[in-house]
């Protein structure tokens, strides 16, 4: 919410300052830019957000167990190896 509002608001203010009198004539470019900013900010926030577990953990020693041992996101605090963090980044974004 706040990231999206600040990002779009600041971009809209910058567009208004940069385009000046041509702001309304170039409204299609401004709208397209705002949509792009909203989508990229949303994607960034979702990729960096931790994931919550909703099911019972899989059995140890299985592929599911190895995936369950990965951190929720690659910067999560904890005793995770560099290999686990790299796998988390590659698999979960």
Image: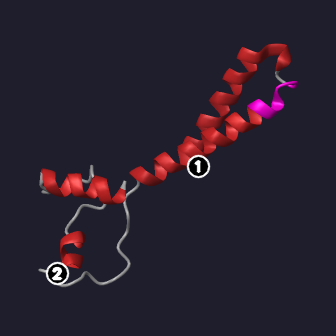
Verify whether residue 43 appears in magenta. Answer: no
Colouring scheme applied when the structure was drawn: secondary structure
Label placed on residue 1: 1
Which structural element holds mark 2?
loop
| Label pair 1/2, CB-CB below 8 angstroms | no
Q: Which residues are magenta?
A: 24-29
Earlier residue among tags 1 and 2:
1
Judged left or right of residue 5, residue 54 is: left
Residue at the image point whose x is 51% and y is 49% from the top: 43
Relative to 50, residue 65 above or below: below
Residue at the image point whose x is 76% and y is 37% from the top: 31
Residue at the image point whose x is 71% and y is 23% from the top: 15
The answer to whether residue 63 shows anywhere in this view is yes
- To which quarter of the image does residue 30 belong? top right
Residue at the image point whose x is 59% and y is 43% from the top: 4
Judged left or right of residue 62, residue 1 is: right
* Nearer the observer, 11 or 93: 93
> Is disc 1 surrounded by few (<14), some (14 to 19) or many (20+) residues within 10 Å?
few
* Nearer the observer, 88 or 75: 88
At which x and y percent is residue 8?
A: 65, 36
Which structural element holds mark 1?
loop
Q: Nearer the viewer, mark 1 or mark 2?
A: 2
- To which quarter of the image does residue 40 belong? top right
At which x and y percent is residue 77?
A: 22, 53
The answer to whether residue 77 shows anywhere in this view is no
> Is disc 2 surrounded by few (<14), some (14 to 19) or many (20+) residues within 10 Å?
few
At which x and y percent is residue 38?
A: 62, 43
Residue at the spot of label 2 = 62
Judged left or right of residue 72, residue 48 is: right
For the residues labelled 1 and 2, the Cα–Cα distance comes to: 38 Å
At which x and y percent is residue 26?
A: 82, 26
């Amino acid at each position: 919410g706040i990231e999206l509002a600040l990002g779009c608001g600041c971009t809209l203010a910058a567009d208004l300052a940069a385009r000046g009198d041509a702001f309304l004539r170039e409204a299609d470019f401004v709208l397209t830019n705002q949509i792009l900013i909203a989508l990229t900010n949303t994607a960034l926030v979702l990729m960096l957000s931790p994931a919550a577990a909703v099911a019972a953990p899989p059995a140890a020693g299985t592929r599911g167990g190895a995936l369950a041992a990965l951190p929720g996101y690659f910067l999560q605090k904890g005793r995770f190896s560099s290999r686990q963090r790299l796998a988390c980044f590659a698999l979960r974004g």
